[in-house]
Amino acid sequence: MRVGIVGRGWGERVIAPAFERTEGCEVVEVVTPRDEAGVAALCARNDVDLISVHSPPFLHLEHVRMAMEAGHAVLCDKPFGRNAEEARSMCAMAEETGLLALLNFEHRYDDSRRRLHQLVSDGVIGEPEHVNWIMLLAWTRVPLRPSGWIFDEERAGGWLRAAGSHLIDFARWTFGEIIEVSGQLRTAVTERPGMGGITEICSADDGFVANLRTERAVTLVIDSSSAASATLPPRIVVTGSTGVLEVVGERVVLHDRGRAIDMFVPESDVYDAFAPQHAFAAVVRDAVRDGSLDGIPTFADGLACVEVMDQLLPGKQRP
């Protein structure tokens, strides 16, 4: 599978090595998303099987359109456009062209999350009832990250979109479609250094709390921040009718009848944040080769996630 990549950030640093390390894959070119002519030239190539779009979300619609008009299968990064309207437009393109359209929810292929998903699906804790998920990182605060699109609401920035998209996707995938949404966004660091030493105001969130309910009557509370003063191991607690599953860092423990049973223990204490992307690269390769979509996140999953996130944005929350 020959891959063309749009994106000099995550695309060049993570996506390109992930595909290069995957048997049967070749990265033919990586282009900057800010060069419209360069993106157009990449999409016009006839020696490409997949265009992998990892531009900032405010450019997703344009780049997906260019790739699909050229007849290429597409892998698009999250949060899948600026809003649900753009996400629906990209879904419509995929439906009209019949082209393979995948979403880069690579954390479905994280070892501990896959194990948690399987345990819930197997009924190890009976019927799931409630989920509490806390993920506090110092990623944008220690050291202080300079201003950029990720802190700009107009350009589809914000921690909800950047990280919350993965958490919401996991919630849908594991516990069913989300039918009720409420919550709050917060911005702990309101100013950041910009170009030329000019201080810029942050208009997007760097933390959020989401209260969700799924069609299976599972309630979820997700509390996350990129601007905590320290990074803590993420913690997920899933309460079921007969037991509780707890994930601390990457370790998965079953609490059942007073016993604590290890269900998954990582091989290393050092978490490889890029490992899920490497695992997903092989899944994408097989989908492009044979069209198999069993459990693979698609544009439809991206749209469902954006529809949930839109309800949490200022001015869009339901009374």
Image: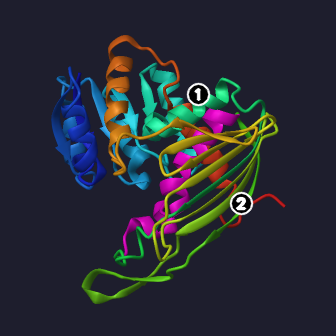
The amino acid type, in three-letter code, at marker 1 is Gln
Which of the pair 228/83 is nearer the observer?
228
Left or right of 130 in this view: 18: left
Which of the pair 195/9 is nearer the observer?
9
Does the magenta segment cover residue 79? no
Which of the pair 312/137 is nearer the observer?
137
Does the magenta segment cover residue 162? yes
Q: Quadrant of the C terminus?
A: bottom right
Residue 129 percent location from the top left of the image: 79, 41
Residue under circle 2?
316
The image quarter containing residue 3 is top left
Tell me the magenta residue range. 147-175
Residue under circle 1?
118
Residue 36 in sight here = no
Q: Earlier in the sequence, mark 1 or mark 2?
A: 1
Furthest-right residue in view? 319
Q: Quadrant of the N terminus?
A: top left
Which of the pair 53/36 is nearer the observer?
53
**Which residue is drawn at the image coordinates 21% and 25% (left, top)?**
25
Q: Tell me how far mark 1 sits from mark 2, CA to CA.
A: 34 Å
**Compared with residue 261, is residue 78 higher up or lower down, i.e. above or below?**
below
SS at mark 2 in the image:
loop
- Number of residues whose C-alpha sits closer than 10 Å to that of mark 1, classed few (under 14), some (14–19) or many (20 or more): few
The amino acid type, in three-letter code, at marker 2 is Lys
Residue 31 percent location from the top left of the image: 20, 46
